[in-house]
Image: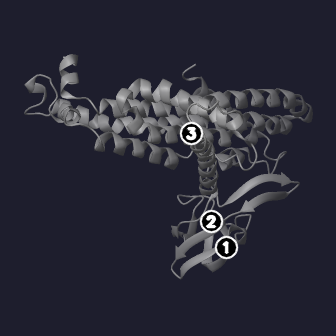
Amino acid sequence: MKYFKPLLCIAMMLFTLLPVQATEEKKEGVDLQGILFGHIQDSYEWHIMDIGETPVVINLPVIVKSSTGWHVFSSSKFEHHADANGLRQGPYGLAIATEGDNEGKIVENGSPVFDISITKTVVVLFIDAILLLLCVLIPARWCRKHKIDDPAPKGFTGFMHMFIMYVYHDIIESILGKEAPKYAPYLLTCFFFIFIANVMGVMPFPPGGGNLTGNIACTLFLALCTFVITNVTGTKEYWKEIFWPDVPTWLKAPVPLMPFIELFGIFTKPLALMIRLFANMMAGHAIAISLTCLIFVMYGIHAAAGTAMIPVSVAMSIFMMLLEVLVCFIQAMVFTMLSAVFISLAHVHEHEAAVKE
């Protein structure tokens, strides 16, 4: 089961791409590869659906600095289709590259420009942040207005109280012990932000549908936060065990073999956090979209085959979506738990090290 999702993802992608080449003449315009990666990748517009040949999109603001200065305009100014050079032409001599090294980026004369546009990923980030604030501020408002011996809240506030206390007691406090209150705000923020982002990514319609945690830039930032907190707050004994661990001297000098390994381990921990969350969420989206694309693939072979595939594909997609909801919770829990473990390992004290020996 450990390798089931990556293998299934690869199989679905290959199965999706191969029939397209064989039936290209029959199903012109059905770019299954574009559908798959178009949903996962970032973009300057939020595509919702197609009505006939007319795409329904939410155009987002473009903010760039080119050779002629700063420009702010709507992404609707770009052409919907690329020209012979693979460029979606736009105003001020700018264009969106659809192929090559700068694919998906705004370029000027073939070179990328300074870009701080509000893309789909940024919009999804704002939406998830607002939802996170609501999940925190609504229960906090109830707590300010009630005493500790008042009856427990009900509804959404009661659910959030239960959820927060579960994460705090069963994950954070069980790992960090007495230091749990100090790091609980960060770890709780990580858990609920990742969980909300994962669940919103599973939703197939706005305001969901954005694959935020399937964007490696987002998981990189979260991993860097854990990396900074872990190493900035680390104790002297933690750093001593890295640069001068309790091993035979010949492993430390003249060749610093063990210090190099320990120092290298500092960077592999956040790397594991980043890759684990990114790969699992991206693979889940890829599998769900690939299962839906099977309908179009089978229609390219024969209309009867496509019709027969509809109930099968829908059933498998629903099953994967339900499974993804469980994965959303598990991945948020794993990231929070591992972050707490890394922080705990950085707070080893001298008497604790002596006990370990």
The residue where tag 1 is placed is 90
As drawn, 190 above or below 253: below
The residue where tag 3 is placed is 192
- Mark 2 burial class by Cα count in 10 Å: few <14, some 14-19, many 20+: many
Image quarter hosting the C terminus: top left
Amino acid, disc 3: Phe
Q: Are marks 1 and 2 in contact (CB under 8 Å)?
A: yes
Residue 14 appears in the picture as rendered: no
Report the side of 236 relative to 14 (left or right): left
Q: Are marks 3 and 1 in contact (CB under 8 Å)?
A: no
Residue at coordinates 9% horizontally, 26% vertically from top-left?
A: 250
Residue 269 appears in the picture as rendered: yes
Asked which secondary structure carries label 1, the reply is loop
- Please identify the quarter of the rendering in which residue 160 is found: top right
Q: Nearer the viewer, residue 172 or 67?
A: 172
Residue at coordinates 54% horizontally, 21% vertically from top-left?
A: 2
Whole-percent x and y of residue 51?
87, 54
Looking at the image, is mark 3 or mark 1 nearer the viewer?
A: 3
- Please identify the quarter of the rendering in which residue 273 is found: top left
Q: What's the CA distance linking mark 3 and mark 1? A: 39 Å
Amino acid, disc 1: Gly
Asked which secondary structure carries label 2, the reply is strand
Q: Nearer the viewer, residue 189 or 299?
A: 189
The residue where tag 2 is placed is 96
Report the side of 238 relative to 291 (left or right): left
